[in-house]
Amino acid sequence: MNFRSEKILIQFGKHLKKLRQEKGITQEDLAYNSGISLSQIARIETGKINPTLCTLIEIAKNLKVNKQDLFDF
């Protein structure tokens, strides 16, 4: 992964964490309700992995935000 991609993933992860915290949802709750492992949520929020589109849609659904809101960072 190149530096630019890493930077984008880190920015996205910080944004996702902020959205989650604003909703008062823990990583554990998001993981459980989304059917995504806790470690995967943590790696997304820290920019360690590039989540799939299906994963992002499931996260948006469980955070009760528009899919577009995930990318407004």
Image: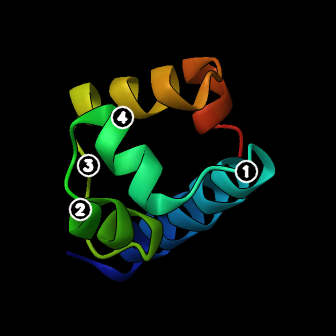
Residue 50: give x, y in percent of width and height: 26, 57
Instruction: Using the image as rendered, state which of residue 52 and residue 21 is in the foreground.
Output: 21
Above or below, 61 against 40 in this view is: above
In space, the residues marked 1 and 4 are separated at their CA atoms by 14 Å
Q: Earlier in the sequence, mark 2 or mark 3?
A: 2
Residue 45: give x, y in percent of width and height: 46, 67
Residue 6: give x, y in percent of width and height: 38, 75
Which image quarter: residue 47?
bottom left
Q: Earlier in the sequence, mark 2 or mark 4?
A: 4
Q: Earlier in the sequence, mark 1 or mark 2?
A: 1
In space, the residues marked 1 and 3 are separated at their CA atoms by 22 Å
Q: Earlier in the sequence, mark 1 or mark 4?
A: 1
Mark 4 secondary-structure assignment? helix
Mark 2 secondary-structure assignment? helix
Q: Earlier in the sequence, mark 1 or mark 3?
A: 1
Which image quarter: residue 58?
top left
| Label ID, residue 51 | 3
In space, the residues marked 2 and 4 are separated at their CA atoms by 13 Å
| Label ID, residue 40 | 2
Badge 1 amino acid: Gly
Badge 2 amino acid: Gln
